[in-house]
Image (cartoon, grey):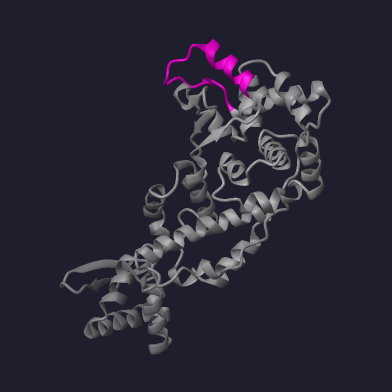
């Protein structure tokens, strides 16, 4: 028999072990309450424990169960399917730990933020919604560039791969989602003479940091982590530790004499211990501020970023005829495909090779 408590009527719900729990019937109408009690008795007789326990403890409630009950077997089948639809949001934290074993922490943190655009914190995300159509629609709602959208898709695909590994999905639906087009490659670069001017316009230790970036194509994040023991002044090979992927941790060659001279003077004068960072205390933000000031003083393009040093390096070395694989290795690329796709038009031409041959003839 139901009773009133506050604005709603309440009743006892019998569970499979014989115990009872008090639950609100989500109604104040006595007639409706009696119908709900009859429903609960019928479901108990049928041993419909999934429906009863979902209404007693969530994620459903008795009022929702009654709505489905009134639709007959079709309604109850729909509720059973809904209750069997796993909430994937509960697996986000476990996926984060899984991803950290496969990528660096900074990448995973970015992935986690991107996944939260698809699965907001605290929101339920049923397994049935993790479909190609749903993902494509979510991708279309992003307001970022194509290249950034591809990073979102990579994060979501990583989550999908985890779900497959945990046997929560039979296949990763994101694998069949068409990725957005990449942005056109950026082609901001400086000529060799302007590169040297820009490096020399900066005070130490920013000058040597710029020499490493411009003279070897090393990304700023990796350059800031170089230690004294990583630098071989005899062979001019420097071991750098990147974070973007496995290929970003690699040995790089400092090609040009101008860069070697500046780096050698800085390294030998500093009397660093083997484990000491060459650029201790420097940051990417400060390096960019110093470079921007130098660009202004030299009246060079103020949009030339720290990352553009890699463009200048790749274009110069490719046009000078260096081995593309060596150039790609310095940049931390897996192979030469990106080098050719972005910078291939700067490779040596037949006329360049002919001029070199003519100059070489005694």
Q: Residue 66 sits in which quadrant?
A: bottom left
Q: Residue 200 sits in which quadrant?
A: top right
Which part of the image, by quadrant, shows the N terminus?
A: bottom left
Q: Nearer the viewer, residue 33 or 202?
A: 202
Q: Using the rendered image of the protein, determine whether residue 286 is visible from the camera's viewpoint.
A: no
Q: Residue 139 sits in which quadrant?
A: bottom right
Q: Nearer the viewer, residue 301 or 167?
A: 301
* Residue 128 horizontal/vertical position (percent): 46, 72
* Residue 285 horizontal/vertical position (percent): 63, 28
Which residue is depicted at the point 39% across and 78% down? 81
314 with respect to 162 (left or right): right
Which part of the image, by quadrant, shows the C terminus?
A: top right
* Residue 334 horizontal/vertical position (percent): 54, 49
Report the span colored magenta.
260-283
Q: Using the rendered image of the protein, determine whether residue 62 is visible from the camera's viewpoint.
A: yes
Q: Does 120 appear above or below 130?
A: above
């Amino acid at each position: 028999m139901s009773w009133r408590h506050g604005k709603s009527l309440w009743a006892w719900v019998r569970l499979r072990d014989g115990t009872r729990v008090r639950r609100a019937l989500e109604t104040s109408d006595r007639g409706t309450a009696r119908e709900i009690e009859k429903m609960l008795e019928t479901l108990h007789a049928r041993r419909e424990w999934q429906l009863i326990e979902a209404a007693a403890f969530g994620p459903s409630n008795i009022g929702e169960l009654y709505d489905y009950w009134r639709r007959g077997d079709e309604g109850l089948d729909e509720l059973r399917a809904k209750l069997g639809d796993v909430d994937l949001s509960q697996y986000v934290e476990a996926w984060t730990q899984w991803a950290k074993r496969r990528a660096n922490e900074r990448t995973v943190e970015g992935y986690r933020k991107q996944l939260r655009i698809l699965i907001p914190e605290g929101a339920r995300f049923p397994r049935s919604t993790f479909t190609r159509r749903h993902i494509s629609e979510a991708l279309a709602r992003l307001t970022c560039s194509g290249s950034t959208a591809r990073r979102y898709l990579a994060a979501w695909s990583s989550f999908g791969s985890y779900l497959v590994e945990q046997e929560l999905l039979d296949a990763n639906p994101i694998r069949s989602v068409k990725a957005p087009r990449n942005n056109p490659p950026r082609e901001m670069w400086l000529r060799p003479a302007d590169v040297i001017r820009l490096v020399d316009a900066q005070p130490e230790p920013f000058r040597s940091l710029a020499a490493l970036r411009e003279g070897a194509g090393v990304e700023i994040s990796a350059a800031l982590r170089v230690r004294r023991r990583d630098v071989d002044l005899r062979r001019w090979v420097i071991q750098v530790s990147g974070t973007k992927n496995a290929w970003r941790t690699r040995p790089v060659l400092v090609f040009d004499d101008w860069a070697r001279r500046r780096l050698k003077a800085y390294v030998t004068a500093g009397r660093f211990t083997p484990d000491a960072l060459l650029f201790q205390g420097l940051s990417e933000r400060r390096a960019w501020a110093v470079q921007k000031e130098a660009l202004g003083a030299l009246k060079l393009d103020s949009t030339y970023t720290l990352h553009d040093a890699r463009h200048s390096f790749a274009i110069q070395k490719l046009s000078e005829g260096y081995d593309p694989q060596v150039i790609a290795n310095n940049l931390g690329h897996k192979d030469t495909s990106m080098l050719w796709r972005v910078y291939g038009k700067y490779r040596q031409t037949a006329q360049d090779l002919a001029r070199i041959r003519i100059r070489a003839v005694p």
